[in-house]
Amino acid sequence: MNLQVKIGELRFANPVLTASGTFGYATEFAQYVDLKRLGGVIVKGISLEPRAGNPPPRIAETPSGMLNSIGLQNVGVERFLKGKLPFLRELDTRVIVNILGDSVEEYAELAERLSGHRGIDALEVNISCPNVKNGGVAFGIIPESAAAVTAAVTNSTDLPVIVKLTPNVTDVTEIARAVEEAGADAVSLINTLLGMGIDIATRKPRLANVVGGLSGPAIKPVALRMVWQVAAAISIPVIGIGGISTAEDAIEFLLAGARAIQVGTANFTNPAASEDIIDGIIDYLEEEKEDSVENIIGGLQM
């Protein structure tokens, strides 16, 4: 059974990756998951300097997912390179580093500083971050600013560049086309949807930041629709994210045109979710008498 997929110039052993922000730096899951079975690991987002994140409470459960407002807490690029990368470079799987910044210049500097290090296979660019030079508006909701970040990163690194798209826009295909034209090698989507919760006993927000990102099964239909739209609108590879917790979920995204998928919130409820999904994809291909996962990618029948 051939599970290999290609994203740009990178070949992955299988299409199942772990989503940034839900798998730490991989060490946290080493006792629960056979890491070498994964197609790839996408580490927690990295900024130039360490970030403490938002004050608690930062996570709230919902009936079909969760809200989070972690605030992009991370160790910063120097501590990542010295303290986290040595473990990651020994993994027998692809390692993708998610990067974030508050200005185009920060993204470019991060891309440059992460380049040339053994063990980093690609960068994933989080453009859902606020542009501090433009009044805090997220880079990813305006085609011009999304393209500016993408161009800055691609001009600063030889690594493949995957741009992670926000769903909090009117037309996600417009943003996808802008980053493709700016040089992105692939896109991943979706990031979390904006949401909030209220504790009726205290009459206070469930998150200290009031608003947070909604993830989990609730967002899967929205994510699937956006992945299908983007896959039809651009020519570079698409990686699907959003509420994927079973092999059936993953296969839906592959049929919709995604060349790979990321498992996120499911990691919190089932640390072995990614392995279960890989096994389920194999079972499906056997049942369908397909000898390669490539045979089902983009196979939606209209």
Image (tube, rainbow, N blue to C red):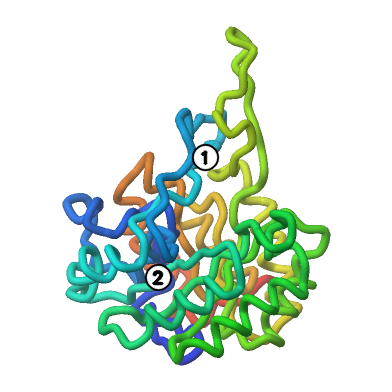
Quarter of the image for the N terminus: give it: bottom left
Q: CA distance from mark 2 to mark 1?
A: 21 Å
User: Position of 237 compared to 260: left or right?
Assistant: right
Residue for badge 1: 68
Nearer to me, 65 or 183: 183
Three-letter amino acid code of the residue under disc 2: Val
Nearer to me, 95 or 278: 95
Specify the farthest residue to the right.
Answer: 170
Q: Is residue 67 visible?
A: yes
For the point 53% across and 44% down, the residue is 216
Nearer to me, 153 or 59: 153
Q: Earlier in the sequence, mark 2 or mark 1?
A: 1
- Residue 158 percent coordinates (x, y): 45, 91
Nearer to me, 185 or 259: 185
Q: Is residue 291 visible?
A: no
Specify the farthest residue to the top.
Answer: 201
User: Position of 228 compared to 246: left or right?
Assistant: right
Is 161 placed above or below 80 here? below
Q: Residues within 10 Å of mark 2 (few under 14, many from 20)?
A: many
Residue for badge 2: 97
- Say the numbered circle drawn on residue 153: none
For the point 43% across and 53% down, the residue is 21
Count of all numbered marks drawn on residues in the image:
2
Is 271 placed above or below 16 here? above
For the point 63% across and 88% down, the residue is 183
As helix, strand or loop, the secondary structure at mark 1 comes to strand
For the point 69% across and 64% down, the residue is 140
As helix, strand or loop, the secondary structure at mark 2 comes to strand
Three-letter amino acid code of the residue under disc 1: Asn
- Residue 17 percent coordinates (x, y): 40, 66
Specify the farthest residue to the front.
Answer: 133
- Residue 67 percent coordinates (x, y): 55, 37
